[in-house]
Amino acid sequence: MVGSRDWQRCSQVVIVLRHQDINMDQLKRLIQKMGELTGKPEEGKLHINPIHPEVNSCLGNDEALLSSEHNRDKYDDYLNTKQKQFASRGWHADTSYENIPSDYIGMKMVKAPMTGGDTLFASCYGAYDRLSEPWQKMADSLSSTHHEPDIMPLADKGLNLWLGPRGHLQNVGGRFEATHPLVITNPVTGWKALWGFSPISMRAKGRINVLKLITDNHDLQYRHRWKPDDIVIWDK
């Protein structure tokens, strides 16, 4: 039954558009406009993926191609399904390693795999609501450090990384690490969310197991099974 507060929140942060015959420029304009309408800094542009120069040479600076073939070829298949921790290792918050992260992320499926390839989304709003009031107050006072350790080693393999401004002048260099509040507030709705729960990229300054709130509460998750020309948009 759709009606619980958690499901309402989860369903409002992931937008699924089927059968969208639009090109990448149109998708980029849509994402940029969404950011502008919800308080994006005036100097903020679309985020530039730092690994784009070689892996995504066929696309523009602010587009990124996700491919299982590239994963095997360029990244030593670091998301190999033979790893016991494969599922939990994949949880992450996009661009959270940047000082000014993206507000919205958009993805279009060009070629879907015959099997597998599903993407799981989790409601950070629902995770915050699952905390008791004392725990919410504690979480409100904490910060967390987000780090993406898998990017810089790619330079040792010969990839030319993009270290210049990545969507904002504060997103520069090869550190790929930033500190943010553990709890963020949506500027449009006023909802509070526990933000960032990757087991490899987030270290909270305090004792709170954010990832466990997601893995133990499957009703906060949405699984998307991709089809060609699907577009999915989600907030950070």
Image (cartoon, rainbow, N blue to C red):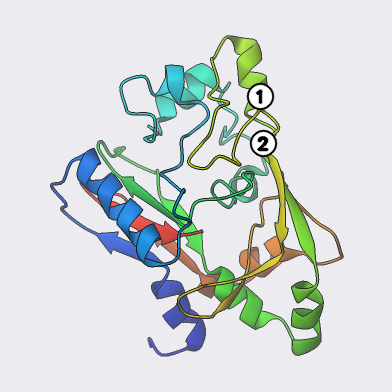
Image quadrant occupied by the N terminus: bottom left
- Residue 44 seen in the figure: yes
Q: Residue at x 53, y 33 (%)?
A: 165
Foreground residue among 154 and 189 = 189
Q: Is residue 34 left or right of residue 91?
A: left
Q: Which residue is mark 2?
A: 176
Q: Residue at x 41, y 67 (%)?
A: 38
Q: Residues within 10 Å of mark 2 (few under 14, many from 20)?
A: many
N-term mark: 2 or 1: 1
Does residue 18 sit above or below 217 in this rendering? above
Counting the numbered discs, the total is 2
Q: Is residue 159 left or right of residue 63?
A: right
- Residue 227 seen in the figure: no
- Residue 222: where, in percent of width, then height? 44, 65
Residue 125 occupies which quadrant of the picture? bottom right
- Residue 146: where, in percent of width, then height? 70, 48
Foreground residue among 232 and 62 = 62
User: Residues at badges 2 and 1 in contact (C-beta under 8 Å)?
Assistant: yes
Q: CA distance from mark 2 to mark 1?
A: 8 Å
- Residue 173: where, in percent of width, then height? 65, 29
Does residue 29 sit above or below 35 in this rendering? above
Does residue 114 sit above or below 72 in this rendering? below
Amino acid type for the residue under numbered disc 1:
Met
Q: Is residue 85 left or right of residue 43?
A: right
Foreground residue among 76 and 198 = 198
Q: Secondary structure at mark 2?
A: loop
Instruction: Give me the disc on residue 152.
Output: 1
Q: Residue at x 39, y 35 (%)?
A: 62
Does residue 54 sit above or below 169 in this rendering? above
Q: Among all residues in the image, which is located at the extreme left?
A: 21
Q: Is residue 19 left or right of residue 85?
A: left
